[in-house]
Image: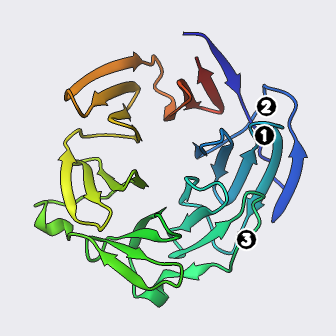
Amino acid sequence: MKSFVFVLLLGIVSFQSRTDVISDMKLPFNADYFQIDNLGNIYIVKEARLVKIFSSSKEKIEYSNYVLGNISSIDVSNPLRLLLYYHDANQFLFLNNKLSELSSPVLLDDADVYNSQLMCNSTGNRIWVYDSQNMQLLQFNDKMELTEKGTPLNRILDDIDVANILFERNEFVYLNIPETGVLVFDSFGAYYKTFPEKGINSFQVFGDSYYYQIDNKYFYFDKNTFESKEIEHLNSDSIKQIIRFNNKLYLLKGKVIEINT
């Protein structure tokens, strides 16, 4: 497998937003995690700072909101409506494709959600929130009106641990609990099934296939044949995250993103 390195430098100066142009393909950076949208744009998060690198121009733009604190997660499924979730503040906001705020931050307390743990985008400008207090998925519309309440997890599981992944794809909602596996819900939040693979660090859905990371191993699962196999054993204990995009693996290792083709 041939590899090259793609890296980004995060400055130490406080800022709300900034624009630069990236021309070098070897750029030092430090990151907590990253995401890639369906256009190939890369989003890198370090504490309260978000950096976007455009796939076409390599232009770099940045956003931060230090009042809200660290960015707990970012959903880039809609590049025109990025969802930034701030767990400690129990708030979220939306950014456009230029990382400008589309609206003021929304406090989930105002929707009677006091212990949110994860968030993601849904169809029709709606959102999903995992309420850890009630152990339930909640869906809200763009007016923060409750539209769906998912199956309570205490009806499914005896022991409920901390969840670390939540996203919607192809009319299904995926909630990963590393000690249990990936719980799958339908578009109304009703429990459908469990993919019982424990210890998952990252998880993606492509058609009828799952791609997922457990430590430094990368796996493929076919939902039609129920075949699961290891497709990559990565000889490094420093891998934080793996994302598959356009048949390439993007690996966050230490202070670089390696793109393996």
Residue 210 in view of the camera: yes
Location of the C terminus (image quadrant): top right
Identify which amino acid the numbered label 3 is placed on. Glu
In the image: residue 229, left or right of residue 66:
left
Identify which amino acid the numbered label 1 is placed on. Leu
Position above or below: 261 against 79: above
Q: Secondary structure at mark 2?
A: loop
Q: Position of residue 49 (x, y in %)?
A: 70, 57
- Earlier along the polypeptide chain: callout 1 or callout 3? 1
Depth order, front residue of 136/64: 136
Tell me the quarter of the picture where residue 35 sits: top right
How far separated are the C-alphas under marks 1 and 2?
Answer: 6 Å
Q: Nearer the viewer, mark 1 or mark 3?
A: 3
Q: Residue at x 53, y 70 (%)?
A: 125
Q: Position of residue 62 (x, y in %)?
A: 78, 55
Q: Nearer the viewer, mark 3 or mark 2?
A: 3
Which residue is labeled 1 in the image?
9
Identify which amino acid the numbered label 2 is placed on. Leu
Which residue is labeled 2 in the image?
27
Crowding at label 1, few (<14), some or many (≥20) Cα neighbours within 10 Å?
A: some
- Earlier along the polypeptide chain: callout 3 or callout 2? 2
Position above or below: 217 against 186: above
Do the residues bearing badges 1 and 2 touch, measured as CB atoms within 8 Å?
yes
- Earlier along the polypeptide chain: callout 1 or callout 2? 1
In the image: residue 47, left or right of residue 189:
right
Depth order, front residue of 168/73: 168
Q: Position of residue 146 (x, y in %)?
A: 39, 83
Which residue is labeled 3 in the image?
101
